[in-house]
Image (cartoon, rainbow, N blue to C red):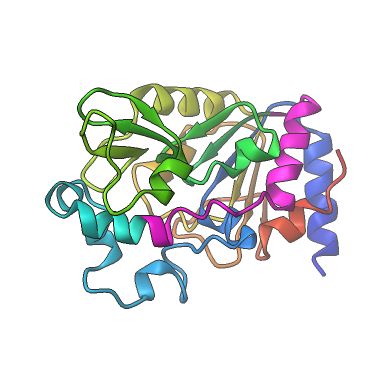
Amino acid sequence: MYEKEIEKLQEIIDDSHRIVFFGGAGVSTESGIPDFRSADGIYHQKYKYSPEQVVSHSFFVRYPEAFYEFYKDKMMMLDARPNPAHLKLAELEKAGKLSAVVTQNIDGLHQAAGSKTVYELHGSIHRNYCMECGKFYDAAYVKNSEGVPRCECGGIIKPDVVLYEEGLDQATIEGAVRAISKADTLIIGGTSLVVYPAAGFIDYFHGKHLVVINKSETGRAVKAELAISAPIGEVMGRLKV
């Protein structure tokens, strides 16, 4: 399946020298991490509060216990491992073909696969800081803590993830925009392109090849040279570097 599309994608990659990959939740679903918006995603499960409420800044401040109960159970999949998409992107970077990964995911799987230049628009579960003294804590400490994780100073630890009502990190935005604007090829994968401001980043691309790989239709009408409706790991895993 997808033989012609993968052949075309291979031609594009062979022709490229500054690829940027822009990815969303669909990149990690093949690693067993649930997404938010698909039919069986987190938004469609039944909770006392909606997931959108829970992962908001105001909810974190008012109900840290309920926030952490949901966050640890549904968003901290520490046993997840990189899939063929993550691994192929790291391989492309090592070969000098790919200049950056821009991701909406917070799972750290791109780095686990070996990618070096990764712009995490929504932060990472692997960085956690005390709100009082700023001390760093890793994901395992947070995941294994009882209830609300606390620092040795007594302060509440907050994950370095961008919650609803919070702004994106300015340095990350600038790095991502710079990479996309200099790319000769932009591959968009595993994202519905409905979350702003992240989805607007692709407007900075003025290169030669635009590719979309996503199981469902994207939320934006992008004029892609190539669109492949398939699981991204399945597609990327068949590419040659």
Image location of residue 27, percent across then percent down: 60, 54
Q: Image quarter for residue 155? A: top left
Looking at the image, residue 203 sits to the left or right of residue 226; the answer is: left
Taking the spot 44% from the left edge, 60% from the top edge, the residue there is: 219
Image location of residue 17, percent across then percent down: 75, 26
* Numbered label tally: 0
Instruction: Please say if 124 is above or below 43.
Output: above
Taking the spot 21% from the left edge, 45% from the top edge, the residue there is: 165
Whether residue 186 is visible here, answered yes or no, is no
Looking at the image, residue 20 sits to the left or right of residue 144; the answer is: right
Residues in magenta, as a range: 72-98
In which quadrant will I find the N terminus?
bottom right
Is residue 76 highlighted in magenta? Answer: yes
Taking the spot 20% from the left edge, 51% from the top edge, the residue there is: 64
Is residue 99 highlighted in magenta? Answer: no
Q: Nearer the viewer, residue 153 or 68?
A: 153
Image location of residue 105, percent across then percent down: 49, 47
Looking at the image, residue 194 sits to the left or right of residue 189; the answer is: left
Image location of residue 213, percent across then percent down: 64, 56
Whether residue 39 is visible here, answered yes or no, is yes
Taking the spot 47% from the left edge, 75% from the top edge, the residue there is: 40
In which quadrant will I find the C terminus?
top right
